[in-house]
Image: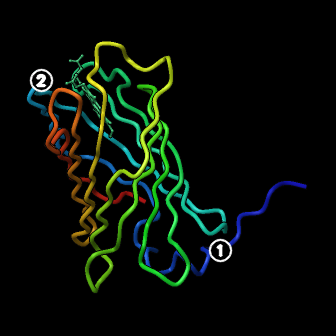
Amino acid sequence: MYMKIFPLHELLHVLAWLEGTWITDEPAVGTYPTIKPFNYFDEINITSIGQPLFNYIAQSWHPETGMPMHRETGFLQILPDTKKIALSLINNIGMFTVEQGDLTDDNNTIIDLKSTNILTTDASIPHFATVTETRRVFTRNGDNLEFIFYMATSKTPELTEHLRAKYRKVT
Ligand code: HEM
């Protein structure tokens, strides 16, 4: 028997708007004090199969060459009977992060998460400074999703913007 896909779990109803595919129409912007600014395109896929969590994949690519860039994948969960969110991710630069936070507004359109755990593998990129803290904020604006990602590193101890992107929901 094949696996069945079940309807969206009731725990996720409050975030039903998030399920789908989100893409950047305009190049997103990457910055950081220690690197050259850059642009990228990105696609986020958020899917459910009926379990009490969303599956999360974000794949970015170079805007001129199409070369795959950052990729991260994991799960987004809502803690039962709360508006608390946990996003557990592994990325292709050798980092695992757990980011937790809240749906911060009454309409459940702002997701504001801060890292609570960061792990690296021996395969993480050696010339990158070590990430010590992250914050990501998703803000829904109709069929658009605004995203800002901040990080602090061993060389830049204050949370500082690294990514800024605007997505449009395509499915
Ligand atoms: C969301 C999680 C991400 C984390 C934790 C992260 C982390 C980092 C770190 C630690 C650095 C090195 C900074 C330094 O050495 O001072 C870096 C650089 C960079 N990141 Fe990210 N990044 C993320 C997402 C992305 C995304 C989505 C892109 C888009 C393609 C991207 C593109 C870059 C580029 C191009 C550099 C510069 C690389 C170089 O100069 O060698 N990052 N990132």
Quarter of the figure that contains the C terminus = bottom left
Question: Hey, which quadrant is residue 6 in on the image?
Answer: bottom right
Q: Which is nearer the eye, 92 or 146?
A: 92
Q: Which residue is mark 1?
A: 7
Q: Are marks 2 and 1 in contact (CB under 8 Å)?
A: no
Q: Three-letter amino acid code at disc 1?
A: Pro
Q: Which is nearer the eye, 79 or 166?
A: 79
Q: Secondary structure at mark 2?
A: loop
Q: Which residue is mark 2?
A: 34
Name the colouring of the figure: rainbow
Q: Secondary structure at mark 1?
A: loop
Q: Three-letter amino acid code at disc 2?
A: Thr
Question: Hey, which quadrant is residue 93 in on the image?
Answer: top left
Question: Quick one: label 1, few (<14), some, or many (20+) residues within 10 Å?
Answer: few
146 is higher (above) or lower (below) than 37: below
145 is higher (above) or lower (below) than 119: below
Residue 103 screen position, x and y as percent: 34, 74
Q: Is residue 86 left or right of residue 22?
A: right
Question: Hey, which quadrant is residue 84 in on the image?
Answer: bottom left
The quarter of the picture showing ligand 1: top left
Q: Is residue 22 left or right of residue 150?
A: right
Closer to viewer: mark 2 or mark 1: 2
117 is higher (above) or lower (below) than 17: above
Q: Is residue 14 left or right of residue 138?
A: right
Q: Is mark 2 within 8 Å of ligand 1?
A: yes
